[in-house]
Amino acid sequence: MDNSRRDFFQKSTAAAAAGMMGLASGQTLAQPMEGEAKGGQHEMVRGLTLVSLLQKDGAETLGVKLPEGVLDVRAAARGLRRTAPLTLDDLLQNGRAGELDALIAAARKKGRAYVLDESKITYGRLFKNPGKIVCVGLNYRRHAKEIGMQPPRVPPLFNKYNNAIAAQNCTIKVPPRDISYKLDYETELLVVMGKEARNVPEDKALDYVAGYCTGQDFSARDLQLELPNGQWMIGKTLDNFAPIGPYFVSADVVGNPNDLKLETRVNGELRQSSNTSDFIFNVQQIIAYVSKHFPLEPGDLIFTGTPEGVILGKPADQRVWLKAGDHVESSIEKLGTLKFSLV
C-alpha cells in the first residue's frame, strides 16, 4: 500500500473518530415546467426505473423504463398538456413524484404514442446538479485486506464535483501524460437521497433513500496519491470521472442495498467481483454518520466505496493502468450495467 494513501486514511479516520464522541406567470399547461411539487408536498419516488434521454436539441430529460419501452416524459407532458418534472434533479429535489405518476398513467392510456425503443435512445446524464456528491473510501473488508490496511473506525469521506458526472456510454478523455496516466476503475453502489436527513438513526436511515444507481468513482492514482500530501479532490474530479447509469431504480424496487452483486469488466475481462454484503459500513451506517455532521438533502449522491480488484490493489510491478481504447463495464445487481470507454 502506498504510504500517502495509508496516511490519508489513518489521519482522516482518526480525526473523524474524535469528532464522533401552481404555474409561473405566463406558463401554459402545454409548456411543462420545473419547480415545486403541487400543493407543496414532497413525494418520494416509488416503483420506478428512470433514465435520462439526450434529446436532439441537446436537452437531457427524464425517461421512464416501462415493459413496452421508455416513456419520453417531455414529449408526453407536451402532448398531454400536463406539467411534469423534466429532469431527475427536479423530480427528487422538489418531490414531484405524484405529478410524474399521474403523467405516466395518462400517457399509458395513449398506447405507445410517447414510448421509445430503448435500443435506439441516446442516454443523457441522470444527474446534472446534485447539491452534494459524498464519497466513502475503503469500505469493503476484502479491499482493505488486499491493500494491507485495517478497516477504518468510521467512514473516510471525500467528495467529487458536478463536472465529473457523466452518462451511460460516455467517453473519458485520457489526460496528457504529464498530468496523469495512472487511471483506475472503481465500481460503486450509488445511493440517492430522497428526503432531508439530519441526525438520522441507523434504523430509520433507509427511509430517506430515494433509490440507487450503478456508479464509477474513476480515479487518477498519481494525482490522488503521489502529489505532495495527496490530492484526492484533483485525483477524483477531472471531467467525466463519475459516470452514472444507465438507470436510477427506486429504493422499494431494489430492496436491501447491502446484499447486491457487483462486477467490473475491462475489455471483457472480469476484474472485480464482490457483493455489498462485504461493506465495512452499510448504507444505513453511512447515512447516519454523514447526517450527524451535515444534512443530506433530496437528490444528494453518495458513492459507497469499491471492493477488491482495483489496479491499485495489485503489486506495483503488476499494475497496468487504463489507457485510451479501453472499455469498462460496471454491473450491479438490479441496477444494470454502466458502460464507458477511454479515448
Image (spheres, rainbow, N blue to C red):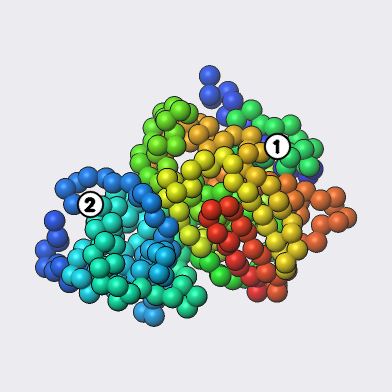
- Quarter of the picture containing the N terminus is top right
Instruction: Establish if 271 lies above or below 229.
Output: below
- In the figure, is residue 283 to the left or right of 186? left
Looking at the image, the residue that sits furthest to the bottom is: 56
Q: Hey, what amino acid is under mark 1?
A: Arg
* Residue at (61% x, 57% y) in the render: 331
Residue 145 occupies which quadrant of the picture? Answer: top right
| Image coords of residue 307 (percent x, y) | 68, 46
Q: CA distance from mark 1 to mark 2?
A: 42 Å
Element type at marker 2? loop
| Image coords of residue 302 (percent x, y) | 50, 46
* Residue at (77% x, 48% y) in the render: 313
Query: Label 2: how many residues lie within 10 Å, few (<14), some (14-19) or many (20+)?
Result: many
The residue where tag 1 is placed is: 141
Instruction: Establish if 39 lies above or below 326.
Output: above
* Residue at (69% x, 32% y) in the render: 151
Instruction: Establish if 327 lies above or below 264.
Output: below
The residue where tag 2 is placed is: 37
